[in-house]
Image (cartoon, rainbow, N blue to C red):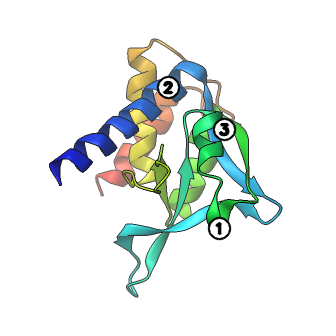
């Protein structure tokens, strides 16, 4: 449905803009680890849904989704630099998807974490913000590597 596509695009755009402004990404975590679900849109070679981790641009959004199977989960703060350099790269290496700002019904856009890095970098540049990364001198160095991978 076109309306659903517009709404999910707005959710993704809000996520990117807000986390770049705040420098913080929110996830849901319990004693068992981070909240993971199965992708609705992407499958592995054997036809199984790829794992998907949802992230939110605000604590309240994350908290609102801590229900049903995630009722024992609590919002946790992740610094944007760590999110980009550790989480997104780790999810890509583990063949996982990212779900930015999924709503209460667990509806949203599923995105390749490497593509998310590129989108976040574009927004950070537009906002004239820089990030301190552990393994890269500059975010553009990471983006160059990521774009090579995405274009293979």
Regarding mark 3 in the picture, which secondary structure is present there? helix
Q: Which residue is drawn at 65% across and 24% down?
A: 132
Q: Farthest residue toward the top?
A: 128
The Cα atoms of the two marked residues, 2 and 3, are separated by 16 Å
The label on residue 147 is: none
Which of the 4 image quarters holds residue 29?
Answer: bottom right
Q: Farthest residue toward the left?
A: 2
Mark 3 Cα shell of 10 Å, populated few (<14), some (14-19), many (≥20): some
The Cα atoms of the two marked residues, 2 and 1, are separated by 27 Å
What residue is disc 1 on? 69
Query: From the viewer's perspective, is the residue at label 2 or at label 3 nearer?
Result: 2
Image quarter where the N terminus lies is bottom left
Which residue occupies the foreground of this view, 65 or 150? 65
Q: Residue at x 47, y 49 (%)?
A: 102
Relative vertical location of residue 147 with respect to residue 36 in this rendering, above or below: above
Left or right: 152 with respect to 114?
left
Which of the 4 image quarters holds residue 64?
Answer: top right
Question: Which x, y percent locates residue 60?
Answer: 63, 35
Q: Earlier in the sequence, mark 2 or mark 1?
A: 2
Q: Farthest residue toward the right?
A: 31
Q: Which of marks 2 and 3 is nearer the N terminus?
A: 2
Question: Which x, y percent locates residue 66?
Answer: 65, 53
The label on residue 82 is: 3
Question: Which x, y percent locates residue 63?
Answer: 66, 44
Regarding mark 1 in the picture, which secondary structure is present there? helix
The label on residue 18 is: 2
Which residue occupies the foreground of this view, 65 or 95? 65
């Amino acid at each position: 449905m076109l309306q659903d596509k517009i709404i999910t695009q707005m959710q993704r755009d809000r996520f990117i803009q807000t986390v770049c402004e705040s420098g913080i990404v929110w996830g849901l975590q319990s004693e068992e680890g981070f909240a993971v679900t199965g992708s609705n849109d992407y499958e592995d070679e054997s036809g199984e849904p790829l794992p998907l981790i949802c992230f939110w641009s605000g604590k309240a959004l994350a908290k609102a989704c801590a229900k049903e199977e995630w009722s024992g989960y609590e919002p946790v703060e992740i610094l944007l630099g760590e999110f980009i350099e550790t989480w997104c790269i780790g999810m890509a290496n583990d063949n996982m998807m990212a779900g930015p700002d999924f709503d209460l019904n667990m509806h949203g856009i599923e995105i390749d974490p490497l593509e998310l890095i590129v989108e976040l970098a574009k927004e950070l540049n537009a906002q004239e913000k820089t990030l301190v990364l552990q393994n890269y001198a500059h975010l553009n160095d990471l983006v160059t590597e990521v774009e090579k991978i995405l274009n293979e």
